[in-house]
Amino acid sequence: MIPFPTVYRLILNREFRNYSLCIVQMTSSKKKKIVVCLPVSKYNEGYFLFTSRFESWNFSSDHFTIVKVDYFRGFFFWVWSFLHRRARRLCYNENYVIAYGSKKGRKLFYKSNRYMMRRGLHFDGQKIHNFPNLLYGWQSPITEKVVQVAIKAKIAIVVHIYYFDLWAEIANLLSNLNFSFDLHVTLVDESASIKLEILKIFPDAQIHMMENCGRDVLPFLILLETEKLSCYDYICKIHGKRSYRQGHVWWEGDLWRRWLFYDLLGAPGIALKIIRTFDTNSEIGMIGSRAYRYPNRYCNDKSSLGTNHKMICSIAGRMGVEFQDQNLDFFAGTMFWVRTKALDPIKKIKLSRDFKRKSHKSLDGEIEHAIERCFPLSVKKSNFHIADFDCVLEEKNEKEL
C-alpha cells in the first residue's frame, strides 16, 4: 500500500454558516496541539484535512462534523490536493487543509488566504492566535475591577452605531479602559432600541439621535459644528463598521473594525500611550492605525483615492489647502484619535450642510468618503503632524509625517 496522509472531511454544521471563522482543535498521540482556524461562509460546504501519517490525532470542534475518509477516496483526494498552490491550502507542519464544495466557496477561501497573507496574519501562522480579539472581537465584559489611572486631559470617545448588534462588542471594549472619558453615542432610528442598554452600562453617556444620512461622518461633523466636543482636549472617533463589499472577502469588514479597535483602544495600554503621546508631543494632531493608513503596501494610491479627487479638491480649497493626489494620507475606516483643535479648519466650513438627505448605498464617491480623506488635511492645515501605531505587527517605531 502507498503511504499517504489520513484524510478527514470537515463538514460545516449548518448553524455556523453565518460565522466568520470556525475552529478545529487537534491533539496528536505525541501530545502535540494544533488550533486550525478556518474561514467560512454560506457558500462553504467544508474542508479536507490531511494529517501526518506518523501520528494519530484526536479532534474537537463545535463547528464541524469530522468524518474519516476511506482508503481509496482518501488516496484520490490526496492526489487531487497536489493541484492546490500555497494560497489554496493551509499548512500545519505536515498537516494541511484544502476547501471543497462550490466553486464560489473555494474561490472565497483562496481570496481569504491571500488577503491574510498580505496582511501578515496567515491563518496557519502563530501570530494570528496571539490576537484573539481580531478573530472574535470583545465577546464578554471584563470581570475584574479596572484600576483607574489619573490623566489631566479631558477625553471624549465618540461612537456611531448603525448596526445595533455591534453595541455589545463596543461596550466590552470600552469597559476595559482605565481612565476617565466622556462617551458620546450617535444613533439613528434603526439603532434607537439600544439606548437603554447603553445607559445601563454607561449611565453618563450622552446620546444623540441623528438622521440616517452620511454614515458615521455626518453625525460626527454635527457634534463638531454644534460645539458638543469643543471642551475636550482629545477625541477618539470609532463606529460599528461592517463594510460588506462586493468582490471582497466576506469577513474583511469584521477584521477591519476589530483591527482599528485594537490599535486605538483595545491593545494593552495603547489608549494611555496615545494620550501621553499627545501630551508630550505638541506637534502631533492625529493618531491612527498604521495598518489602515492609506496609501500603503496593502492599498495603492489609485485605490486609496477612489473616485473622490474632485470632491476632495473642493473641500480642501474651502479650508485653504491645495490638494495633490500624491499627498493623500488618511486613516481608512474613519477611526482615529485627534487633537480637538486640529479639526477647526474642517469644522469652520460647515460641511454638514453639503449632505443630501437620501439613502447612500455607494461604497465610494459620496461626500462622506471625500471628508474621510480630508480630516488629515484639516490636521495639517492646523500645523500638526500625523502619527500612527501598529499593535498587531509589532513594529516598534511610530511613523510620523
Image (cartoon, rainbow, N blue to C red):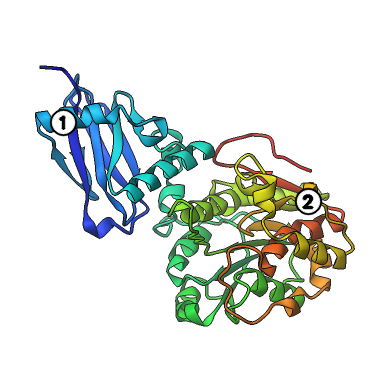
Q: How many marks?
A: 2
Q: Quadrant of residue 91?
A: top left
Image height of 153 relative to 388, above or below: below
The residue under the point 55% across, 71% down is: 361
Give the percent coordinates (x, y) of residue 33: 27, 31
Amino acid type, callout 2:
Asp
| On-image quarter of the N terminus | top left
The residue under the point 56% across, 37% down is: 393
**Residue 151 appearing in the image:** no
Task: Tell me the number on the disc at residue 325.
Answer: 2
The residue under the point 79% across, 70% down is: 347
Give the percent coordinates (x, y) of residue 57: 18, 30
Give the percent coordinates (x, y) of residue 138: 44, 56
In the drawing, does residue 387 fall left or right of residue 237?
right
Q: Residues within 10 Å of mark 2 (few under 14, many from 20)?
A: few
Label 2's element?
A: helix
Cα–Cα span, label 1 and label 2: 55 Å
Label 1's element?
A: helix
Give the percent coordinates (x, y) of residue 337: 68, 56
In the drawing, does residue 88 fall left or right of residue 157?
left
| On-image quarter of the C terminus | top right
The residue tagged 1 is: 74
